[in-house]
Image: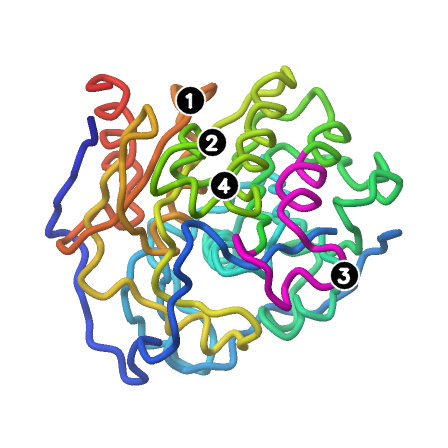
């Protein structure tokens, strides 16, 4: 059974630049582009400055007027998290972009693994290396995952993926088998035993890939390989949380700059449904998925748990930690 939380604490300010609603939606569930990860190096960067004068807290769908073209953060997101170093894998994908932007807004130190590090600069601008580190690497190639990449890492959010059906995104051996199975296996095998949590973004329907309608989505194995990735995480001995989104909706769309990223909004779809048992069927805003990943990092009882997540019209938890705790707890209680 799913739990739904409504709240009126988050305002829905109109956006000057509007939503990204004119771009085509992707039909299969959780088919955001995969970003695997070649030898590595740190990319130095300078101070963090956002170029847009209108910064939107993506996880809350809230417009903030930002003087001097610098991001203005509210009291809930300005507290530094010096004890955390979050490794984001897939950080330039649809969900991953929002994860990184939200970590930056919370002053949580982050490290990205990317095949193409230049994408990080294009999306997030120049960042202080004390805030954001960028490494070059490819999870599909285990020899690329040098142990030193994970020095100091306390948490991992893995949101890699590729399309469910053959497309140009499969070019370069970027198939579900290579990304959702082999990439996840290689990454997890390389992670240190000291890790406090790995959050894996998977998909609804992974336990039902031989049943209709899921068998249609699984024609090329995407759900089967995601389930294999899940199973490897579960059996790794590492503390984990698995998030299974419904069909991904809303921006950002990949290959856009930071301005586009920060304009993303869930609109009226801020109410959150969380369930367990692979029973939820529906859609979910990428904004909600990203926020769920970040919130789960600090909720102790989400360790070892698998959650499905959807979003529907209505006011939701925003970035309020207690409301997210209530949602996750209710899902476990009602399962």
Please tell me whether residue 10 belongs to the stretch shown in magenta. Answer: no
How far apart are the two marked residues, 1 and 3, measured between alpha carbons? 34 Å
- SS at badge 1: strand
Assign the N terminus to one quadrant of the image. top left
Task: Name the front one of labels 4 and 3.
Answer: 3
The 10 Å Cα crowd at callout 3, few under 14, some 14 to 19, many 20 or more, is few
Would residue 251 appear left or right of 174 to someone viewing this image? Answer: left
Residue 304 position within the rendered picture, expressed as x and y whole percent measured from the top left: 47, 19
Residue 136 position within the rendered picture, expressed as x and y whole percent measured from the top left: 80, 56
User: In this rendering, is residue 305 above or below 131?
Assistant: above
How far apart are the two marked residues, 4 and 3, measured between alpha carbons? 22 Å
Residue 155 position within the rendered picture, expressed as x and y whole percent measured from the top left: 59, 34
Q: Which callout, 2 or 4, points at the residue further toward the start of the chain?
A: 4
Report which quarter residue 325 is drawn in: top left
Report which quarter residue 154 is drawn in: top right
Q: Which callout, 2 or 3, points at the residue further toward the start of the chain?
A: 3
Assign the C terminus to one quadrant of the image. top left
Which residue was labeled with disc 4?
Answer: 201
Task: Name the front one of labels 2 and 3.
Answer: 3
Q: Which callout, 4 or 3, points at the residue further toward the start of the chain?
A: 3
User: In this rendering, is residue 117 above or below 198?
Assistant: below
Could you tell me if the residues under marks 1 and 3 are in contact, i.e. CB atoms within 8 Å?
no
The 10 Å Cα crowd at callout 2, few under 14, some 14 to 19, many 20 or more, is many
Q: Residue at x 23, y 37 (%)?
A: 323
How far apart are the two marked residues, 2 and 4, measured between alpha carbons? 6 Å
Would residue 217 appear left or right of 116 to someone viewing this image? Answer: left
Could you tell me if the residues under marks 2 and 1 are in contact, i.e. CB atoms within 8 Å?
yes
Which residue was labeled with disc 3?
Answer: 172
Task: Name the front one of labels 1 and 3.
Answer: 3
Q: Bounds of the magenta span?
A: 163-184
Q: Which mark is residue 242?
A: 2
């Amino acid at each position: 059974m799913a739990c739904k939380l409504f709240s009126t604490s988050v305002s829905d300010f109109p956006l000057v630049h509007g939503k990204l609603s004119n771009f085509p939606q992707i039909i299969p569930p959780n088919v955001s582009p995969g970003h695997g990860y070649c030898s590595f190096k740190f990319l130095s960067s300078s101070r963090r400055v956002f170029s847009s004068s209108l910064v939107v807290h993506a996880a809350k769908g809230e417009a903030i007027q930002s003087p001097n073209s610098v991001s203005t953060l509210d009291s809930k997101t300005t507290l530094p998290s010096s004890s955390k170093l979050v490794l984001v894998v897939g950080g330039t994908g649809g969900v991953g972009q929002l994860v990184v932007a939200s970590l930056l807004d919370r002053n949580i130190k982050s490290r990205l693994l990317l095949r193409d590090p230049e994408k990080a600069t294009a999306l997030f601008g120049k960042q202080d290396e004390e805030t954001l580190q960028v490494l070059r690497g490819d999870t599909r190639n285990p020899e690329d995952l040098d142990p030193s990449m994970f020095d100091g890492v306390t948490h991992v959010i893995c949101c890699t993926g590729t399309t469910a059906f053959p497309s140009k995104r499969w070019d370069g051996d970027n198939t579900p088998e290579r990304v959702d199975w082999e990439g996840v296996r290689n990454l997890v095998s390389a992670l240190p035993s000291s890790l406090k949590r790995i959050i894996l973004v998977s998909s609804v329907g992974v336990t039902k890939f031989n049943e209709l309608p899921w068998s249609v989505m699984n024609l090329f194995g995407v759900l089967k390989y995601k389930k294999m990735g899940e199973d490897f995480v579960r059996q790794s001995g590492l503390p984990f949380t698995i998030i299974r989104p419904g069909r991904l909706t809303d921006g950002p769309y990949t290959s856009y700059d930071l301005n586009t990223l920060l304009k993303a909004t869930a609109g009226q779809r801020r109410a959150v449904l969380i369930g367990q048992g692979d029973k939820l069927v529906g859609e979910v805003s990428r904004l909600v998925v990203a926020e769920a990943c970040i919130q789960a990092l600090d909720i102790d009882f989400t360790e070892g748990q698998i959650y499905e997540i959807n979003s529907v019209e209505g006011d939701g938890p925003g970035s309020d930690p207690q409301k997210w705790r209530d949602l996750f707890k209710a899902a476990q209680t009602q399962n």
